[in-house]
Structure formats: C-alpha cells, structure tokens
Amino acid sequence: MILGHRWHGRGCLAGLVLAASLTFGAATARAADPDPDLQAVQAVCGRCHTLAVFLNKPRSWSRWNDVFADMTQRGATGTDEQLERVTRYFLENLTLVNVNSSPADELAWVLGVPDDVAQAIIARRERQRFTTLAELRAVPGVDAAKIEQRKSRILF
Ligand code: HEC
C-alpha cells in the first residue's frame, strides 16, 4: 500500500495504519477552496516550521518517505484522516515520478490515473521506453489535463 508507507514504521505514529483502503475514486473528491488536504499539511507539518521548507520542492516518493520517517521521529503526528490527506497532498502535488521506472502505484497517484492505466503504462514502457509527454498522453485512459498540470514532476 502506497499511502502511509513509512509513517508507522517506527516512532510515535506506530500503529496508525494510513488509508490502506483509500480508493482512487475517493482521491478525486475535494472541495474547491480551501484545499482540505493542504489544510491537513498545515496542521501536521506546519507545527514546527513553515511549509516553505518543502512546498515547490518536489522529490521522489521514496525520498518523501524518508522525510516522513524523520519527521515522525522528531514528533510529527496527526489523526489517521490528517495523515491520509498529507500523504495524498504530497503524492498529487510534490512527488516526482519516472514513467520509465517508477512502480505502478506511484504512477497511478502522481499521474492521476486508475491502476489499470498505470499497468498499461508499464506494458508500454516494457515494449518501448517513453521519451515524450505526447507518448504518455497517447496511452488510453491518461488524462491530458492532469499530465499538463503535473508535467514538471514527470521524468523520463
Ligand atoms: C515536531 C516538529 C516537526 C514537525 C511536526 C515536522 N517537522 Fe519537519 N523538521 C523539523 C525539524 C526540527 C527540522 C530541522 C531538521 C534539521 O535542520 O536537520 C525539520 C526539517 C524539515 C525539512 C528539511 C530537511 C530535509 O530533510 O529536507 C523538511 C523537508 C521537513 N522538515 C518536512 C516536514 C514535513 C513534510 C512534515 C509533515 C509531515 C514535517 N516536516 C513536520 C521538525 C518537524
């Protein structure tokens, strides 16, 4: 399960199981303004320092998990719902993905596609590596608007 990957690995969030059941469909439901996921980030991560230490500074999902583990050890905590929102916010807004190497769950979250489309992307790259966003958009089920919006985080 991608959500909450290492939140509960060690430290004071032990036992909190994040969003194992969160479905892709649920991820698309959100109020227009203010963004409740960003509000959760503010509540969980803004307690000790400004969000400027990470907003607009995308990293790979594995590097974010290292940060989450580090911050958990420093005392970061939240309700299950807050951590689920934080996880989703990072995946949708601050996570880098490599269409030629990232695992299916990361492709699904970062590109905003269902699992079967993520699998189709993997099948396509096994036949032939992606070299352009246009090739990615050509995979059936890929949302061109989301790709446009997230293109700075899509690597080849
Ligand atoms: C209990 C206090 C606390 C909370 C809550 C907290 N942090 Fe931190 N964070 C720190 C401290 C202390 C540092 C400075 C560490 C240093 O200078 O080595 C830091 C530094 C950072 C850094 C810069 C260092 C790096 O690894 O790049 C990032 C990024 C970061 N925090 C992200 C987060 C995120 C994301 C959250 C929410 C999930 C969060 N923090 C919540 C205490 C906290």
Image (tube, rainbow, N blue to C red):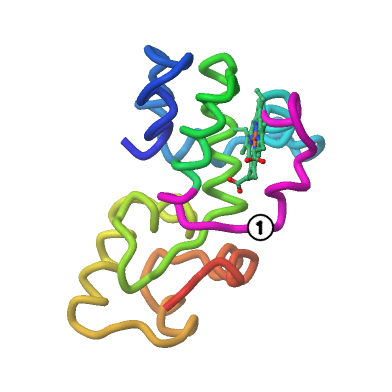
Image quarter for ligand 1 equals top right
Taking the image as shown, residue 25 lies to the left or right of residue 46, namely: left
Q: Which residue is mark 1?
A: 57
Image coordinates for residue 93, horizontal then vertical, percent: 62, 52
Q: Residue furthest front?
A: 74
Taking the image as shown, residue 93 lies to the left or right of residue 155, namely: right
Amino acid on which disc 1 is placed: Lys
Taking the image as shown, residue 33 lies to the left or right of residue 150, namely: right
Q: Mark 1 Cα within 10 Å, few/some/many (few <14, many 20+)? A: few
Ligand 1 near label 1 (Cβ, under 8 Å)?
yes
Image coordinates for residue 84, horizontal then vertical, percent: 52, 28
- Compared with residue 130, is residue 118 higher up or lower down, i.e. above or below? above
Of helix, strand and loop, which one carries label 1?
loop
Image coordinates for residue 109, horizontal then vertical, percent: 45, 50
For image coordinates 52% across by 41% down, the residue present is 67
Q: Which residues are magenta?
A: 45-63
For image coordinates 60% across by 65% down, the residue present is 150
Q: Depth check: 115 or 15 in front? A: 15
Taking the image as shown, residue 114 lies to the left or right of residue 84, namely: left
Looking at the figure, which quarter contains the C terminus? bottom left
